[in-house]
Image (tube, rainbow, N blue to C red):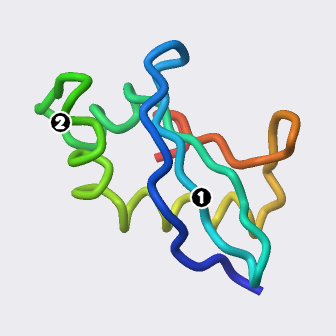
Amino acid sequence: MTLAQGEFKTYDSDRDVVRFSMKNGDTEVLCAISTSAMDDLDSPTKVSQSQREAQFMRLRSRIEERAIQKFLDAEFEGKPAGIILRSIDF
């Protein structure tokens, strides 16, 4: 089964990541993408903290496409296990 779109969760300024979810049937899969990865995808744009949600929405299809691939490759990290995207993933 592949993942379906979930929801934007929050911008975590302490970890410099945007948290979001994907859906595997009825199960929520927690995901995060580093702000540096988003800035690299959005190059040459670097946005302020208040613009992170809008940036995520603008890049959402590319971010989710990569999250789906990591899910299919079973590349989970953390506790609870989730998907973490970094610049190197793109």
> Taking 75 as reference, is 36 above or below it?
above
Q: Nearer the viewer, residue 70 or 19?
A: 19
- Read off the residue under disc 2: 43
- Who's the residue at 58% across and 79% down the image? 4
| Crowd around label 2: few <14 · some 14–19 · many ≥20 (10 Å) | few
In the image, taking residue 69 as reference, residue 72 lies left or right, namely right
Identified at 85% across, 45% down, the residue is 81
Q: Quadrant of the N terminus?
A: bottom right
* Upstream in sequence: badge 1 or badge 2: 1
In front: label 1 or label 2: 1
Mark 1: amino acid? Ser
* Left or right of 8 in this view: 71: right
What amino acid is labelled 2 in the image? Ser
Measuring 43% from the left and 18% from the top, which residue is drawn there? 13
Q: Position of residue 40 (x, y in %)?
A: 30, 34
Query: Which residue of the protein is positioned furthest toward the top in this rendering?
Result: 14
Q: Nearer the viewer, residue 72 or 51?
A: 51
> Residue 50, image x and y in percent?
21, 29
**On the image, numbered disc 1 is attached to which residue?**
21
What residue sits 83% from the left and 34% below the top? 78
Q: Position of residue 85 (x, y in %)?
A: 57, 41
- Contact (CB < 8 A) between labels 1 and 2? no
Tag 2, which secondary structure? loop
